[in-house]
Amino acid sequence: MAEGGYDTASYIYDVYSSGLISKYGTPSYWLRYFSPAPNGTVDSSAAHAKAELDAAWDSGGKHLGPITSPPQSHLSGTYAQGVADAQTFMSALITVYDWVGPLYLPTNKTLYCWLDQGSATSMSTNYWSGWSGYVNSYPFAGGYPFYACLYCNPLAAGHNCSTIGSAGGCFAVWSSEPETGYCGYTLRNLPSWHASGCAPPAPSTKLWQFAEAGYCRLSYNVDMDEGTLTPYSFYLGSRP
């Protein structure tokens, strides 16, 4: 069965309401930003993390996918810069995991961890190798549960597919395209799968952002996504 969810740069409690659910549908998951990121992050404080995840639970979206968005200038940088940004990201994930008691790793011990690459950004092989290598080799809970993944426009001119294809270490792509012709769909009425993707040896597209708030002039500051993510995301065992 197809899954749909929301991603947002806003706090979940600022965008979740009964109006959102009645207009666009109940999410299977949320995707939210963790440090480093330019906007508010889940890891900004313990009270804040609890409040966001309370809202996620109340919305029906009891799964959480983590994404990070370092300064886009970093992505064309060095291996060391990639490692440094990944260290911040992993620290943020573990901090929230420790703060929120009923937040669990996926039962398959495979948590997709997304790096946000803007369409106008070229990503160096060195940066990706540093970032993904640190994420993929981070030991936690008796294993290596973190899996490096990339959010991008696979058709953009900037190096993304070619970088992850040549460097390896990427387990999934989250595509931001296409949106033209899909703004009329919602989580209640998901479109047939038509996400843009990278050519092999880059990995396949697992998640598709088919409706973006600004482009589609949505009534709430959420983007809508399609793809099976719940087995590869944090999940809440109860309301925090």
Image (spheres, rainbow, N blue to C red):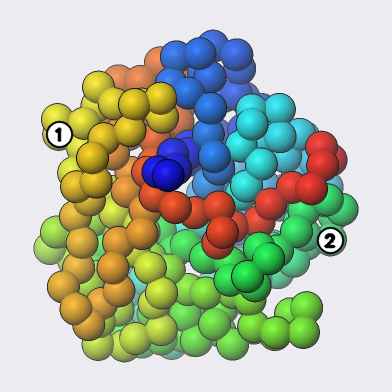
Residue identified by numbered label 2: 98
- What secondary structure is marked by label 1? loop
Question: Residue 120 lies in what quarter of the image?
Answer: bottom left
Question: Residue 187 lies in what quarter of the image?
Answer: top left
In percent of width and height, residue 213 lies at 35, 28
Return the disc, 1 or 2, that comes first in the chain's sequence.
2
Residue 179 is left or right of residue 95, and the answer is left
Tally of numbered discs: 2
**In this view of the protein, which residue sits in the foreground, 4 or 71?**
4
Residue identified by numbered label 1: 180
Question: Is residue 38 in view?
Answer: yes
In percent of width and height, residue 145 lies at 63, 76
In percent of width and height, residue 104 lies at 75, 59
Q: Residue furthest front?
A: 1
Q: Amino acid at mark 1?
A: Thr
Q: Real-space Cα distance between discs 1 and 2?
A: 41 Å
Quarter the N terminus occupies: top left
Above or below — where is 41 with respect to 198?
above
Question: Is residue 45 in view?
Answer: no
